[in-house]
Amino acid sequence: MGSLTQISFLSHILIHLLALTLTFAQPHFLFHNCSNSVNYTIPSTFQTNLNTLLSSLSSNIDAYGFYNSSMGRDPDRASAVALCRGDVELDICRSCVTVSTSKLIQLCPNQREAIGYYDNCMLRYSNNETIFGKMAWGPGFEKWNTNNVSDEQLSKFNEVRSRLFGGLINRAASGDSRRKYATGEAQLPDSKTIYALVQCTPDLSESDCSFCLNATLERIPSCCSNRIGGAVYKPTCNIRYELDKFYNDTKDAAAPSPQLAAGPSNNEPMPNAALPPPLAAGPSNNAPPLSGMNIVIVSSIVIFVTL
């Protein structure tokens, strides 16, 4: 037990040392969620597996900004998924994930399941492998710009936004196992430009990525319908749009096709597919309905999270 405690302690220290000089460079931590019902003891085999896995996570991320892996055997297996925004450089991606590991351990002590989001990356870990290759609806969050589209422009704005997202979703879903990501822009009638980004974890199938993104798009009317910017983040996919360019150009950012977004526009579940309750919170296997909420206002951005 003494050896186990020493290894766990050293792994924990390594995570904090790696993050120490990088924290200042990271943007605001957007959101996190801990599964308070699933705990581990200290010291334990699971803690050692988790710390060992997280301490090496950032160095194993590939040039496409994604990595998933497990450490140990059931019932002490630790599994983790790290995903960086598709336009983020590898060194920035890795530093973001390193800081995330330290942040989540600090915010979710003794928790076997946790997820955290920076603008540049997402980190998620669990005590099983069910987080690999399966669409997850929660926990997640939404954010939006507090500035509104004018009433006379709203109808056309929504139409252009829907068409833009439709093309991007098709492109991202058809990506390979390394990257499922797309960005694009479209001109609005008032000579302004709308910029958009969509992304899935690349371990999803094409159909699951498409479903996840279209289901996420269905949240836009309820959170961000008349807003000039907004975003919806889920564990396996996310979408975002703004009137200011918020991503870097990459070779994947070709012009989107003019195809309209799939799915109904009235925020109802897509046919022949059972969606979890709107804004479902909790474990990644679609948790109980909303039990509470916080609204955080940061500058001109509102973040809505379900806890």
Image: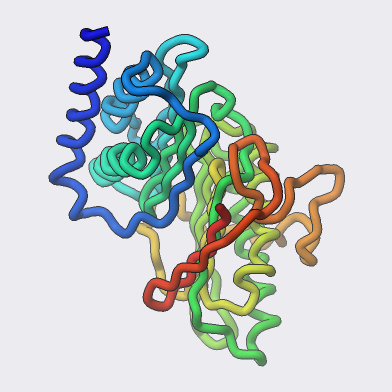
Q: Where 238 sits versus 14, above or below?
A: below
Q: Where 287 sits versus 278, above or below?
A: above
Q: Position of residue 10 (x, y in %)?
A: 18, 22
Q: Quadrant of the N terminus?
A: top left
Left or right of residue 220, residue 27 in this image: left
**x 34%, y 31%: residue:** 61
Left or right of residue 158, residue 46 in this image: left
Report whether residue 101 is seen: yes
Residue 74 vs residue 133, the one in the foreground: 74
Quarter of the image for residue 203 reads top right
Residue 185 vs residue 201, the one in the foreground: 201
**x 46%, y 41%: residue:** 115
Q: Position of residue 127 (x, y in %)?
A: 49, 23
Quarter of the image for residue 176 reads top right
Residue 143 vs residue 108, the one in the foreground: 108
Q: Where 277 sits versus 188, above or below?
A: above
**In this figure, what is the number of numbered marks?**
0
Residue 175 vs residue 221, the one in the foreground: 221
**x 48%, y 46%: residue:** 33
**x 46%, y 38%: residue:** 114
Q: Where 259 sits versus 274, above or below?
A: below
Left or right of residue 16, residue 229 in this image: right
Q: Position of residue 57 (x, y in %)?
A: 32, 28
